Amino acid sequence: NNEKKWTLLYHRSPSRASYPRALFGVSGFNLTYWTWYVADFVPSVNSSAHTKAELGQIDAQTLDMLLVDPNMGYVGLGMASIIWLGAFLYSRQLVSAIWAPMGASSGEEQRSVLAVSSLK
């Protein structure tokens, strides 16, 4: 049997995973909000304002006040994407457990071999 046996050296408590998961969840919600803002809210508001102007219900000054600048939405979406990516990469870098080969005594070459798993 060539299969190595491993000793668990470190195990991160699952209760300590709540902060990274909350960070990932909140950043995901933020990304969803800005996606909705850019894809639905701004076009709907601007379309409605243009329709009212075409029907003569509002004048040009009111139209200028009602129009929403889409650039703000794109900036928000870009920032939300960066925050979400950072939260994702941070949670992937956390170490969940570390194992070493069983029977490796100090000074042996095998001791430099470790198995690491990340947070799921």
Image (cartoon, grey):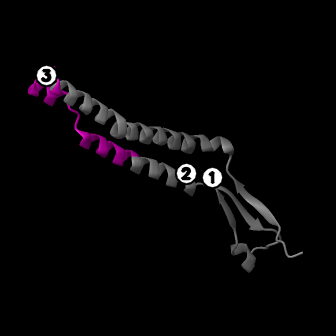
**On the picture, is 80 further left or further right than 116?**
left
Q: Magenta stretch: dominant SS?
A: helix
Q: Earlier in the sequence, mark 1 or mark 3?
A: 3
Q: Earlier in the sequence, mark 2 or mark 1?
A: 2
Please, what is the three-letter code of the amino acid marked with disc 3?
Gly
Residue bearing mark 2: 91
Viewer-proximal residue, 111 or 72? 72
* Residue 68 falls inside the magenta stretch: yes
- Alpha-carbon distance for marks 2 and 3? 54 Å
28 to 64, vertically: above or below? below
Residue 107 showing in the rendered view? no
Residue 35 magenta: no
Q: Is residue 104 left or right of residue 13?
A: right
Name the residue: 81% across, 68% down: 102
**Which residue type carries mark 1?**
Leu
Specify few, some or many for label 2: CA neighbours under 10 Å numbering under 14, 14-19, or 20 or more.
some
Most extreme residue toward the top is 57
Does dot 2 land on a helix, a strand or a loop? Answer: helix
Give the residue at mark 3.
56
Q: Position of residue 104 (x, y in %)?
A: 79, 73
Q: Which structural element holds mark 3?
A: loop
> In the image shown, does 38 or 27 lie closer to the viewer?
38
Q: What label sits on residue 119 in the rendered view? A: 1
Query: Local crowd at mark 1 within 10 Å, few (<14), some, or many (≥20)?
Result: some
| Image quadrant in which you'd find residue 95 | bottom right
Q: Residue furthest right?
A: 1
Q: Determine the residue positioned at 74% across, 67% down.
A: 100
Pick the quarter of the image with the N terminus: bottom right
Where is residue 35? Give x, y as percent. Answer: 39, 41
What are the residue bounds of the magenta stretch?
54-80
Judge from the rendering whether residue 33 lies leftward or rightward of residue 96; answer left or right. left
